[in-house]
Amino acid sequence: MKNPINTAVAIVVFNRIDCAVKILESIKKVMPPRLYIISDGARESVPNEKEKVLEVRKYLENNITWNCTIIKIYADSNLGCTKRSVTGYDEVFKIEESAILLEDDIIPVDGFYYFCEKMLEHYKDNDRIMMITGENRIPSYENNYDYFYSAFPMKQAWATWKNAWNHWHKAAMGDFDLKTANNWLKECVNNKGVQYYYGSKLIRCKMQLYDVWDGVWDCAMLANKGIGIVSKYHMVNNIGIGRADATYMKNDAELAHLPVGDYEHEITFRTDNIVCDKSYDLEQSTHMLTDKYTYFLRSKTAYFFYCHFPRLYKFLSRLFN
C-alpha cells in the first residue's frame, strides 16, 4: 500500500453517476488531503437533469471515507463546460499553490497521482514547465527517459501550479504577443500542418474568439514558451468516449483503446536540457498533418481586418457568423 498523497485533487463532474463512482474509487486509493468537487448546474431544457446533478453531488459527499477536507464548488445554474471548468479551477487556485485536475470520465491508474506529485514538487520553481499530464497518446514512444517534454501536452488528467494557471486569463483576453507565440510554435515543430493548426488557434485567441478552455490553455503555453511534462505511460482510462452524453467525443475513437500502463520503478528525474521533444510532438499531432492552410488563411484575414478595420470586421463577423 502506497502512502496517501499530499497534493489536493479537483474533479469536474456533472450528471453521470457511473463516472462519479469510478473516479471516486480511483481517488480513494491515494486519499488526498483536500478534494475539490467542481459541479455544473443542470440545464433547464433537459428533463430530470437536476436530479442527476444532485445525485452525483450527494454520492461524492457521502462516500469520501478517509480524512479529507471537501470543498464544494457548485453552480446553481448551467455555466457550460468551459466556464464551469475555468471558474472552478480559479477557485481551486485561490487556495492551492498546485493541484491535480481531473475530468469525471478520465480514470487514472494509481501511479498517476504519485507521478504528478513528484513532478509538481521537483519543477515547482521552474517557470518554463507549465503542466504535467498522465495522457500519453503514443505509449510506444521511446527516448530513454521516464517522461517527455512536450509543447502540446493533453489536458484531461493533469496537474499544474497557480502561477501557471494565471496565464490562462491573459491568453483568453488576447493579452500576449502573437509574434513571440508563433516564433515559439515554429521552434517547437517543423511541420506546416501543425503550425497552421496552432497558428489559427493563436489568432482566434488573440481576437478573444476561443471559447474552449483547453484551446486557450494551448495558446497560454505557446505565448509563454511553456513546456509540459508527459508521462512515459498512458496512465488513464477514458470511459467517456462513444457515449451519447459525451461533450465532444460522441463517436468511438482510438484514444479509448490505448494501452494503459504504470511505473513499476522509482522515477528518475532528468538532468539534460529542457527542450521539447520534436519527434514526439510531431507524432502525436498526426491528426493535424492535413493541410490547414485554408483555415489559417481565413484566420489571418480576419485578424487583419480586426486590427486595421474594426468596424468592417464587426460587420463581416455578423454577416458570416
Image (cartoon, helix red, strand yellow):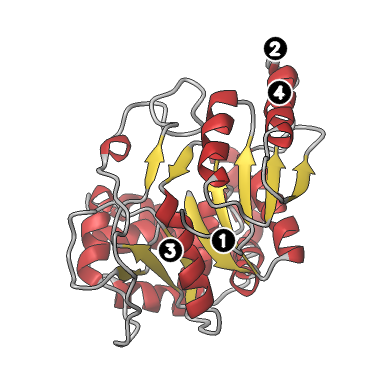
Instruction: State the residue position of label 1.
Output: 5
Q: CA distance from mark 3 to mark 4?
A: 31 Å
Q: Which label's residue is closer to the chain start, 2 or 1?
A: 1
Which amino acid does the dot numbered 1 rest on? Ile
Residue that extends furthest to the front in the rendered view of this protein: 1
Nearest the camera: 260 or 89?
Answer: 260
Q: Is residue 304 visible?
A: no
Tag shown at residue 263: none
Residue that extends furthest to the right in the rendered view of this protein: 76
- Closer to us: mark 2 or mark 1? 1
Instruction: State the residue position of label 2.
Output: 47
- Closer to us: mark 4 or mark 2? 4
Badge 4 crowding class, 10 Å Cα cut-off, few under 14, some 14 to 19, many 20 or more, is: some
- Closer to us: mark 1 or mark 3? 1
Instruction: State the residue position of label 4.
Output: 55
Nearest the camera: 259 or 165?
Answer: 259
Q: Which label's residue is closer to the chain start, 1 or 4?
A: 1
Badge 2 crowding class, 10 Å Cα cut-off, few under 14, some 14 to 19, many 20 or more, is: few
Secondary element under disc 1, as helix, strand or loop, is: loop
Badge 1 crowding class, 10 Å Cα cut-off, few under 14, some 14 to 19, many 20 or more, is: some
Tag shown at residue 115: 3
Total numbered circles: 4
Secondary element under disc 4, as helix, strand or loop, is: helix
- The residue depicted at 71 percent of the width and 51 percent of the height is 68
Nearest the camera: 33 or 41?
Answer: 33
Q: Position of residue 210 (x, y in %)?
A: 56, 52
